[in-house]
Structures are given as structure tokens and as C-alpha cells.
Image: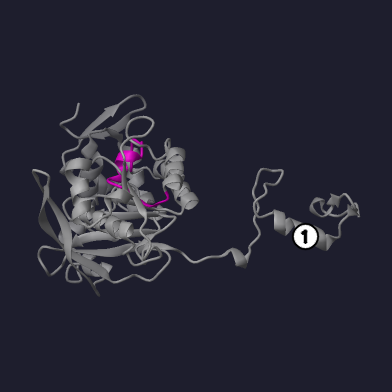
Amino acid sequence: MTDQPPHLRLVRSGGRVSAAQARRRIVKRGRSEPAASGLVIRTADLSRTRPFRWAWDQRVLLGYFNLIIGEEGIGKGNLAAWIAARITRGELPGDLLGRGRRVAFIGDEDSWDHIWTPRLHAAGADLGRISYIEAGSNGALNVRSDADALRDYIKRGRIALVFFDQLLDNLGVADSWKDKEVRDVLAPLRTVARATEAAMLASMHPNKRGGSFRDRISGTPAFNALSRSSLLAMPHPDEQGRCVVVRGKGNYSMEPDAFEFRIAGQTLNVSDREIRTSRITDVRETELRRDDLLMNGGRRRDDESKAGQARAMLADMFADGREREATEVIQFFEGTHGIQKRTLSAAARDIGLKIEKRDFPAVVYWRRPDRP
């Protein structure tokens, strides 16, 4: 028996156990008990499987990170208010239907008292089930350093959905286009989602360019890669004043029908005050698909060429005024978007980036000309 593997040489008070007993014990204990190496080994167990759960059927997953991508003014805030309101009332198609649940908002891009509370009321939300997280340990909430506090609050408050009003404000990273930085900072948020089974829904602006859905997301493709369901909000291709929401990326179900709406103004009378806000109206589902929005008559627009994309992406990247090493930027765009050095260098000149050589050996830096 001495030549048996260590995991079979198990002893209990009554003596040695058989190999079969040892294996059964390993299966039972191996699901969650760490081995001596520090690894946690789990045995595949069909009885533990479960279906995905949806806060909004086929669109927003519970227990995962989700995105809404759309230009400023397209209606992302009104869409978020509509989703939140339906969740607080138990009216949203999905696994929370019939059960009103709590929703939390994070971010200060829009004022809570001036914008969000009136907007949520107009959307029909149960305001007693809405909370706003104003700050974290260092001022603005940071999804990395405040992850434990956020997890505890979600569990304690039984929050079903957390909406980030402009996610980039809460990342605490210097460059949102660096893949590893974004993956590192979003890892705690994804852990919070799994631990609480709450849906994490974040709003982001797209890059000022066309192309595929993946190309339209600001910063590194890691945002879309880490999202399990990403929604794209765009103007209706045929009906002016109407917005269309399609699922640009989804891992775990077929693409649902497009969700369409208009935004209507509304005036609220609160005590002696007149509050103007807006809400979603004229809601319907249609058979529009992602490609109907991304393509124009089956052909890409002129500004969706590689040169046009390069100009738009560089303008977006350098909008923060920071200077960057040219080599680092070129390597990023070559590896991520397949845009070659010659095209990118020409695009940098076209949009007026200032090019400087410093240090020894010489290092080339790019920056906006209006920045020192």
C-alpha cells in the first residue's frame, strides 16, 4: 500500500479506508477545500449546474458585468431609468418578473437631485427602492479599492442591479485603453457581481468612429471582452427621433429583438416647484438587428476606412490632454485594431498632434498642441 498516491492514503480513526472510499471523500471535499498547494480544486458536478438568470430577459444578466454603449444625448440615462423603474416594480421581463427589487446608482455625471430623481419618478420607479452611492473611501467610488464595501452593501440591501453612470469615472486608471489595467481594475467588480448575483450595468460613450460594434467602444476592447452582454443604443435608421437598442455582444443566448422608444418631455409639480424631466415612451420591439444599425445601406461610410478610424480613435484617446509614447500607442493600435504604423503616423499629423523627441536614446512623444 505504500506505493499508493498520497491522495489515496487517507486514515480515519477506524484505520485505513479503501481506494473507493478515498475517492468519494475527495469528490465530496474537493469542491471547496483548498489543497496543500493553495489551489482550490472542484470536481465537475452536473447537479450543481443552473441556468443563467436575467434582470432583463436576454439583455442584462444577473451576476455579471453588462454595458450600455451610446452617444451622449441618445437616451442611455432614460433607458437606465426605465430599466430601474421596471425592476423596482417587478415588471421587467426576466427572472425578477413579479418581484419588486432594489436598484443602486453610482456616478456623478448627472446630478442626483436635478436629473436622476425626477427622471426615475417620471419612469414610474418605486423611489423607496432606489439608492444612490455618492462616494467611496477616497471620494469618488473606486471599483477596485471599494469593492468589499460595495459587495457588503449590495448583500445587505439585497440590491438586484447596480448602474454606473459613466463607468470610466469609477475605474481609477490613468489609461482606459490599456488592456491589462482595465482587466485588473474590473476583476473585483466581476467578483462582486458573482458573489451577490446582482447585475452590474455600466454606461459608456462610444469612440467617434464607425466600424464594427467592437471598434465603437471607447478605450481597450477589454471592456467589451469582459462584459457578458453589451447593448448598443443608436438612432433609428429610418424614423427620426426614435432610438433603437440592440444587443451588440452576448455570450449566452440568441440576439433578442431590437428595443425601440422615443423620449418625451414631462413636467412634474413638486410642492411649489415645477420640475422638467423626460421619460421613455412609445416602446416596442422590432426585428431590426445589430448590422442594420452598424451598416449604412450595406456599405460602410467613408470615415470608416482605416485612415478615418485612426484619426477618430487618436482624437478620442488624446482628448484627455495627456502625452503618450508614440511607440506604445502604435503597438496598441497595430495589435488591437490592425492599423499599421504608417497609417497611424499620418493620422496623428492629420489631427494636429504635436510630435516631440526627448531623452537618450530618443523617445518620440505625441500630445495635443494646446497642451504644454
Q: Is residue 192 left or right of residue 318?
A: right
Name of the residue lying farthest toward the bottom: 287
Residue at the (39%, 31%) spot, across then down: 137
Residue at the (45%, 45%) spot, across then down: 156
The quarter of the picture where residue 249 lies is bottom left
Q: Is residue 216 above or below residue 137?
A: below
Could you say where residue 280 lies in the image, as x and y percent from the top left?
Answer: 18, 60
Decide: few, some or many residues near mark 1? Use Cα within 10 Å; few <14, some 14-19, many ≥20. some
Q: Is residue 71 left or right of residue 57?
A: left
Residue occupied by mark 1? 23
Helix, strand or loop for disc 1: helix
> What quarter of the picture does the C terminus occupy?
top left
> What quarter of the picture does the N terminus occupy?
bottom right
* Stretch of the chain drawn in magenta: 158-176
User: Disc 1 residue type?
Assistant: Arg
Could you say where residue 247 lies in the image, as x and y percent from the top left?
Answer: 31, 64
Depth check, front residue: 253 or 163: 163
Q: Is residue 145 above or below residue 103?
A: above
Q: Is residue 169 above or below residue 229?
A: above
Depth check, front residue: 282 or 157: 157
Could you say where residue 210 lies in the image, as x and y percent from the top left?
Answer: 22, 57
Residue at the (39%, 45%) spot, across then down: 179
Depth check, front residue: 107 or 232: 107
Depth check, front residue: 353 or 287: 287
**Is residue 128 visible from the viewing direction of this image?**
yes
